[in-house]
Structure formats: structure tokens, C-alpha cells
Image (cartoon, grey):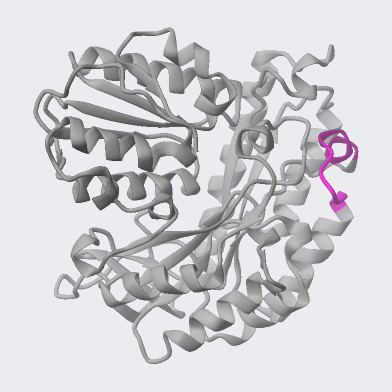
């Protein structure tokens, strides 16, 4: 491991603030940063000025990169005198951009964050570096129930990506796909369940590529179900690429009685086979639709959410209309719609046939309007049916199909309750 220098003579106080940007994997890793800091004796700043600010960055699009730079500048302004630790995907791609912002900025590779935070603990007069949890803490590594603060918690089971979509640079920032040992995932999931989490979300950059000594994602889930038999906890797959949905996973979704949520986030990106080919997505529109039809046949109550990019370079109006038609055919319960954002360093960013900004904006607006309509229609089909919901806070719960609904006030956070889907949803 590379030695990480700390270029400040000391820390004022022992409080921290954490800024998390980007995907669910970043959220899980940021939870790990918090655990390491609290074990080392640091306290949350509670909105006041902190002596340490950790910014976990995102670089998935050009717009995300801009937000990341803005967040670091804001941290420097809002916390005068603080050490600002910048880590994550944007820091991996462009470390010099951040290190040149201010002498208080320390760019730290995620793999070295444990060493860095251990050194900080010594500087601040708290626990020695050896007392701080190892790097596995960033992926999960829970000491026990006292550390839990939310009722739906993530466990990182995979990192990296072997795909190279032409709009994306995450495979460069994260590296090749790797899988966490199944025993570690099981340990962390059991700790969460024992601590009161009603839902454990399996997260990864390319989650469906999970492969630990021949154990695939469906095998891992079966092991988790067996280990938590009789406990009030369910599992959710955070996101999975279409080509990674195999027969074993389909069967598990259909037959686990909701212990694996009958909800998948299945990124489409475009409903045009031509555009998908230029994105270097490893499927065509017909293959995606056939998968969706197979999923609905096996699991009629399945809820499907997705990501769609509007205005990819060269996308014609006719090709965009193909995407709208595909979204209707798939009956998505939720669509994350993004106008295409040029990410420097990707093949798509240097194409000469960029779609005009106003066209991208208009198409993204159309997508969001359709998304709202499809979400209302999907929820209407569920009214009066029963689903398990996990109580997130008094009076509010998250259903298996990924809707926030109102529930009676007397239920405890983390509790899994069978509920009749009401006439309206909260979010």
C-alpha cells in the first residue's frame, strides 16, 4: 500500500462532515468511512464547522464531475481550516484537479482510506491507526447493532466493471470487476439484520457479474436467505445489467415469497438498437424486451425501474420515439431520465454529431413526463393488493415494489409488515 502523507500539522478538534455524491455503492462506502471515523474517536459536526470533511466523489457524467468540483469548493468555504479528504471515482480519474484547489485538500485513493484515516486518528490524539478497522470496513464490516442508524441498509458485494460503454468512464475509475468473499457479505448482512435493518440492499458497480469461487449472485442470495431464515429481513438487488439476469435469478425472484424483493432496476439506456450498438451495450432492443416479458411471465407482480439517456450523440427523433415506445412496452414503475452529458475521456464525448442541448433537454422532459404517467399506472395496478413493506420511520414505509406509502404510526422502524397498498403513494 502506498504511504499517504498528511500535509497539515494537526487537526482542530475532532469533528467530521461527510459529503456523498453518486451511486448506491458510494453510499455504502461512505457509511464505511463514517464507521472508521467514529471508531477513531471523531464525532459528526452536526452542521457546524468540521475539522475533517470527506467528499466521496462521482464522475459518471460531465455534469457529475462539475457537481463534484463544486462540492469540494463548498467544503473548503464552509469549513475554514478543515482538512478536506477527496476520494472516489472523480478523484481517481483527475486527482490533480482537486489537489491544486487548496493546500488543505488531500486526494486519497479509496484503497488507502483506512491508512489515511488511521493517521488522522493519531494526529488528532485519538485511537492509534492499528485500532481502526481495515479497508474491508469501506465495503461493509459492521461491529454490531449499535452502529446502525437506518432501516434499509446497503452491503457492497462487488466492485469494478469489465464493460466499456462509450458514454461511461466508471470502468476506468473503478477498474476490473471484483467480487467480495461470500463469507464477508454474509457476516455484514447478518450484523445488519441483527441490528434491526428490515431490508439489506446488495450493491455493486456491476452487481450481476458477482462470481466468488463459482458462486453467482443467485447462489449468494440463496445462502443469505438460508442464514436469515426466521428473521424479519428481506434482500433487494440494487441494480443489474440485462445480460446478467439468468434463469436462476428469475426463479429466485418468483419463488422467494418477497424475501428477495420482486423489484429490479434494469438499465435500458435507449430503446433503439442502433443507439444501443453505438453505446456498446451488449444487447439490442428486442433482447431487452424479451427479457422483460420473461420476467413478467415468471413474476407477474414484478416492479421494474430503469435508467434512460436522452440525446445520445447521433440520436434521431425517430430513435428517441423508439425509446418512448420501449418504455411503454416495459411498463416501468420508475425511470431515471438523464439528458446525455459529455464525459471527457469517453468515445461518445468526441463524436461530431452531438445533439443540441435544447433537444436533449426537451427529450429528457418528455421522458420524465412519460415516467410519471407510467409510475401512476403501475401503482394503480397495485392498489388493494398486499405487499411486505419495511417501516423506515413512524408513519412511513417502503414497499417491495419500491413505493413509499403511509402506514399506521405505531409501527417500529425496521419492522417488516404486510400491508394493503393504499390509494396513493408518498414517493
Q: Is residue 382 above or below residue 31?
A: below
Q: Residue at x 85, y 32 (%)?
A: 318
* Whole-percent x, y for residue 413 in the image: 22, 69
Q: Is residue 51 left or right of residue 391?
A: left
Q: Residue at x 59, y 24 (%)?
A: 93
* Res. 384 in view: yes
Q: Residue at x 37, y 76 (%)?
A: 190
Front position in the image: 387 or 123? 123
Q: Is residue 381 above or below residue 270?
A: below
Q: Which residues are magenta?
A: 274-285
Q: Residue at x 38, y 52 (%)?
A: 134
Count of residue discs: 0
Q: Is residue 276 magenta?
A: yes
* Res. 383 in view: no
Q: Is residue 86 above or below residue 290?
A: above
* Whole-percent x, y for residue 226 in the image: 50, 88
Q: Quadrant of residue 4?
A: top left
Q: Is residue 166 magenta?
A: no
Q: Is residue 243 left or right of residue 110?
A: right
Q: Residue furthest bottom?
A: 230
* Whole-percent x, y for residue 319 in the image: 84, 34
Q: Is residue 211 above or below residue 104?
A: below
Q: Is residue 337 left or right of residue 68?
A: right
Front position in the image: 220 or 305? 220
Q: Quadrant of residue 112?
A: top left
Amino acid at each position: 500500500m502506498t504511504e499517504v502523507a498528511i500535509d497539515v500539522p494537526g487537526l482542530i478538534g475532532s469533528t467530521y462532515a461527510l459529503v456523498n455524491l453518486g451511486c448506491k455503492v458510494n453510499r455504502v462506502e461512505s457509511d464505511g468511512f463514517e464507521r472508521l471515523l467514529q471508531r477513531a474517536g471523531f464525532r459528526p459536526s452536526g452542521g457546524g464547522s468540521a475539522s475533517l470533511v470527506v467528499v466521496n466523489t462521482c464522475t459518471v457524467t460531465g455534469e457529475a464531475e462539475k457537481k463534484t468540483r463544486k462540492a469540494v469548493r463548498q467544503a473548503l468555504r464552509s469549513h475554514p481550516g478543515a482538512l478536506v479528504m477527496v476520494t472516489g471515482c472523480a478523484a481517481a480519474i483527475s486527482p490533480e484537479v482537486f489537489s491544486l484547489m487548496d493546500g488543505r485538500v488531500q486526494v486519497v485513493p479509496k484503497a488507502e482510506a483506512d491508512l489515511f484515516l488511521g493517521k488522522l486518528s493519531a494526529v488528532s490524539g485519538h485511537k492509534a491507526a492499528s485500532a481502526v478497522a481495515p479497508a474491508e470496513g469501506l465495503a461493509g464490516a459492521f461491529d454490531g447493532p449499535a452502529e446502525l442508524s437506518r432501516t434499509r441498509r446497503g452491503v457492497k458485494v462487488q466492485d469494478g466493471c469489465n464493460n466499456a460503454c462509450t458514454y461511461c468512464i466508471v470502468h476506468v475509475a473503478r477498474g476490473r470487476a471484483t467480487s467480495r468473499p461470500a463469507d464477508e457479505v454474509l457476516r455484514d448482512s447478518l450484523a445488519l439484520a441483527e441490528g434491526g435493518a428490515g431490508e439489506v440492499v446488495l450493491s455493486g458497480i456491476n452487481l450481476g457479474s458477482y462470481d466468488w469461487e463459482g458462486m453467482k449472485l443467485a447462489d449468494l442470495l440463496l445462502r443469505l436467505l438460508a442464514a436469515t431464515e426466521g428473521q424479519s429481513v428481506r434482500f433487494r438487488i440494487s441494480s443489474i445489467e440485462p445480460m446478467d439476469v439468468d434463469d436462476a435469478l428469475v426463479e429466485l425472484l418468483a419463488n422467494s415469497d418477497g424475501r428477495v424483493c420482486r423489484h429490479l432496476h434494469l438499465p435500458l439506456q435507449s430503446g433503439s438498437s442502433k443507439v444501443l450498438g453505438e453505446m456498446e451495450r451488449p444487447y439490442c432492443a428486442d433482447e431487452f424486451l424479451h427479457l422483460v416479458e420473461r420476467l413478467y411471465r415468471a413474476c407477474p407482480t414484478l416492479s421494474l425501474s430503469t435508467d434512460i439517456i436522452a440525446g445520445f450523440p447521433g440520436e434521431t427523433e425517430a430513435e428517441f420515439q423508439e425509446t418512448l415506445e420501449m418504455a411503454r412496452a416495459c411498463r416501468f414503475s420508475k425511470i431515471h431520465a438523464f439528458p446525455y452529458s459529455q464525459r471527457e475521456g469517453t468515445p461518445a464525448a468526441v463524436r461530431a454529431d452531438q445533439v443540441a442541448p435544447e433537444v436533449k433537454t426537451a427529450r429528457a422532459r418528455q421522458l420524465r413526463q412519460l415516467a410519471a404517467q407510467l409510475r401512476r399506472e403501475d401503482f394503480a395496478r397495485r392498489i388493494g393488493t398486499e405487499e411486505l413493506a419495511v417501516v423506515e420511520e413512524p408513519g412511513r414505509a417502503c414497499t417491495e415494489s419500491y413505493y413509499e406509502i403511509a402506514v399506521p404510526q405505531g409501527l417500529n422502524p425496521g419492522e417488516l409488515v404486510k400491508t394493503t397498498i393504499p390509494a396513493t403513494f408518498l414517493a
